[in-house]
Image (cartoon, rainbow, N blue to C red):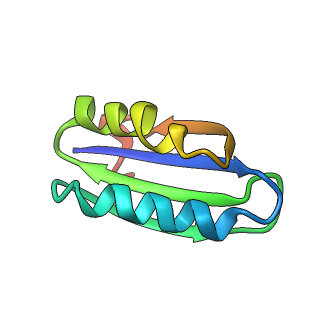
Amino acid sequence: MAIAYVLINSDLGSDETIISGAKDILSGQPEIQYEIQGVYGVFDVVLKLISEDAANLRSVITNKIRRIPQVQSTLTMMVIDEQEKS
């Protein structure tokens, strides 16, 4: 099982738009479970993704989530498989 945390920096005031856009993208990906929340701090949105297919997960992050127009930058952290249950 692949788990990824994506930390997103957005244009000022566009966090709700990014959350909505990510939900639209991910609703078309039934094999990916997700949680998404706006946060205070260095990043504006935190997205947790879970899938059995790591390659598909990376593709969705790279080709869809990061291309939402108001996304300025992302930091993606993939969980190490051997340590995910620690």
Please indicate whether residue 31 sits to the left or right of residue 35 in the image. left
In the depicted structure, whether residue 59 falls above or below residue 27: above
Please indicate whether residue 36 sits to the left or right of residue 52 in the image. right
Task: Tell me if I can see residue 85 in this picture.
Answer: no
Seen from the viewer's position, the closer of residues 66 and 1 is: 66
x and y percent of residue 63 in the render?
Answer: 40, 32
x and y percent of residue 12 in the render?
Answer: 83, 58
Query: Among all residues in the image, which is located at the extreme front?
Result: 69
Task: Tell me if I can see residue 39 in this picture.
Answer: yes
Seen from the viewer's position, the closer of residues 60 and 14 is: 14
Please indicate whether residue 4 sits to the left or right of residue 43 in the image. left
Residue shown at 62%/37% (left/top)?
75
| The N terminus sits in image quarter | top left
Residue shown at 27%/64% (left/top)?
27
x and y percent of residue 16 in the render?
Answer: 63, 71
In the depicted structure, whether residue 20 falls above or below residue 11: below
Residue shown at 53%/38% (left/top)?
66
Seen from the viewer's position, the closer of residues 82 and 22 is: 22
